[in-house]
Image: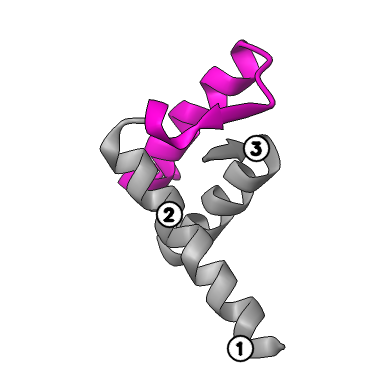
Amino acid sequence: MDISLPELEQAINYWRARKPSVGEECALSAEVSALARVYALMIYHRTAYIALAALDPVARQLIEIAINQQARLVQAGA
């Protein structure tokens, strides 16, 4: 399964809402930081999609959690 840049942005926003930046320096949470690395590489390489299997296990799990939670919200609203 591939994930698109907009889907990755949604996952980042999901985790930002749950784990906001902290401190005066506004440090990113570990979850957001892990996904931000993927995002930065996609932008750098001008990649619109990336295979979930190509990601490290932590980033993959964070994305899967965000996607599953968003799907549950859609189903609950239907």
Residue 56 place in picture, x, y as percent: 31, 31
Residue 42 shows in the view = yes
Disc assigned to residue 67: none
Residue 47 place in picture, x, y as percent: 65, 19
Q: Compare residues 40 and 19 and report the one nearer the observer.
A: 40
Q: Which residue is mark 2?
A: 64
In what element is the residue under mark 3? Answer: strand
Quarter of image, res 78: bottom right
Residue 20 place in picture, x, y as percent: 45, 58
Residue 63 place in picture, x, y as percent: 45, 49
**How far apart are the alpha carbons under marks 2 and 1?**
18 Å
Mark 2 or mark 3: whose residue is earlier in sequence: 3
Q: Residue at x 49, y 70 (%)?
A: 69
Q: Which residue is mark 3?
A: 4
Q: Residue at x 62, y 52 (%)?
A: 10
Q: Is residue 38 above or below residue 7?
A: above
Report the amino acid beneath label 3: Ser
Q: Residue furthest top?
A: 45
